[in-house]
Image (cartoon, rainbow, N blue to C red):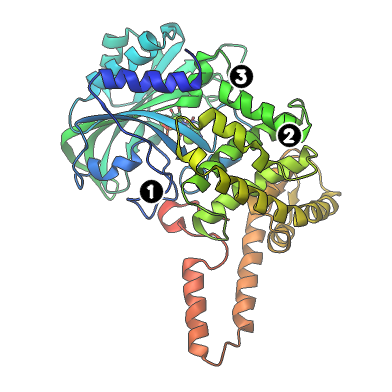
Amino acid sequence: MNSTNDIRRAFLDYFAANDHLVVPSAPLVPYNDPTLMFVNAGMVPFKNVFTGLETPPAPRAASSQKCVRAGGKHNDLDNVGYTARHLTLFEMLGNFSFGDYFKERAIELAWGMITKELGLDPQRLSVTVYHTDDEAFDLWRKIAGLPEDRIIRIATKDNFWAMGSDGPCGPCSEIFWDHGPEIAGGPPGSPDEDGDRFVEIWNLVFMQHLQEADQITGDLPRPSIDTGMGLERIASVMQGVHNVFETDTFRELIAASEEMSGAKAQGEQLASHRVIADHLRSTSFLIADGVLPSNEGRGYVLRRIMRRAMRHAHLLGADKPLMHRLVPALVGEMGQAYPELPRAEALITEVLEREETRFRQTLEKGLRLLDEETSQLGDGDSLPGETAFKLYDTFGFPYDLTEDALRARNITVDRDGFDAAMAQQKAAARAAWKGSGAAADGELWFDIAEREGASEFTGYAATEGEGRV
Ligand code: ATP
Ligand code: MG
Ligand code: MG
Ligand code: MG
């Protein structure tokens, strides 16, 4: 009853029984938002419904939405393998009210789900509310009977959600589970809240205002509800483990990775196995949804994730390509809930194998160079940006792979130097361009290439802020 697959089922059944229409997960590439890299929350497929552009499929809906947070505004890539709660691909369980029920019912439903359906101990739950949201504060007291010191007022944007600078927005309320005093970390709002003791499991968004240019301009005529609970996080709570990588799904994937690589998941190798298991999921789901590795845009994010996993496979001493051999384990774990996975199994296998075979040809040489260049560096030092750029340009090392490779030795990478080397190379290419005789075309090409990003991914920065290589 506590398996990840059972919990997903229990969630959807509960909301179906409470008059919600259960909708399947949308593909990871958003059909309705060209500025967004990947679907990164359960509400994304409903964006146009919340703004009134589309008619809702029903007044109330629920889903288990696959989400990727590895690029753009929400980028958890660097956390993965190193925190107990972040994955690049995860499933967001959500219930939605499109102008139907609001705060009171949303809190009632959430509390009923976790304490009655799943039977969580209320003593170990605490919640946050936006500092001005007295209504939510009072409702948590009334419905859940929570003592005041476990309803924490938060004044930061963490507890205020907005679709963008224009559009619906409103306060949030997050539900946290206390994994116990043996784990480091403080309650939400405290200075050491980033520890893993108190883990956010569910976020309830109360869409009640409209804003223009980041200023609240009025109230929505019919407020709405958007919630998201991380399936892997609630599964770890239900399974009595504190880390998402210790849940059933990940145990299976890591067992496969141990078997195929011949390296045990212990000591320094543990993080590598975790990264591999996580990246196997995100890369496979992305390929199943039609993304292929390339040097720009979504394809480059996919390539970055793949290559990063492949370095970890190399660290484990895998003497031949590893990732594609783990696909059957993934399909076994998740194929029933996501039929697109078995459907694309052959393609996923082929793409992973081809990419890893290719990358292995330069990976070793690049790592050797990295070793040489860092032999004199130690704790707290920084790798020159030019070296990181050479690794990128000559050996196909995405920037974040180099960063990840030096992380264990606490060596950082000079990002500005890297960007400068990149800019210099672009300028040199431009200066060297003689063209085909049609000089104007060449100029035009470079203008477009610089604006849109030609061979490496720098885009989406204008809309999402963090789209760097
Ligand atoms: P955190 O503060 O832990 O990074 P968040 O506030 O960014 O989480 P939300 O945007 O509120 O997360 O997403 C809703 C829920 O999705 C979270 O409560 C959490 O359970 C889950 N979730 C978010 N990011 C991840 C992730 N990278 N891996 C696994 N689950 C996640
Ligand atoms: Mg986050
Ligand atoms: Mg949070
Ligand atoms: Mg949140």
Question: Is residue 270 found left or right of 8 in the rendered image?
Answer: right
User: Spatial distance from mark 3 to mark 2, Cα to Cα?
Assistant: 33 Å
> Given this view, does label 1 or label 3 mark the residue nearer the observer?
1
Q: Mark 3 or mark 2, which has the lower sequence index?
A: 3
Which is nearer the eye, 158 or 72?
72
> Given this view, does label 3 or label 2 mark the residue nearer the observer?
2
Q: Answer yes or no: is residue 188 visible.
A: no
Q: Please name the amino acid that badge 3 sits on.
A: Ala
Instruction: Name the residue carrying label 2.
Output: 260
Which is nearer the eye, 350 or 210?
350
Question: Is residue 43 found left or right of 238 in the rendered image?
Answer: left
Q: Mark 1 or mark 3, which has the lower sequence index?
A: 1
Q: Answer yes or no: is residue 150 visible.
A: yes
Circle 1 residues within 10 Å: few <14, some 14–19, many ≥20? some
Q: Mark 1 or mark 2, which has the lower sequence index?
A: 1
Instruction: Name the residue carrying label 1.
Output: 30
Would you identify the image quadrant in which residue 258 lies? Answer: top right
User: Spatial distance from mark 1 to mark 3, Cα to Cα?
Assistant: 37 Å
Instruction: Name the residue carrying label 3.
Output: 184
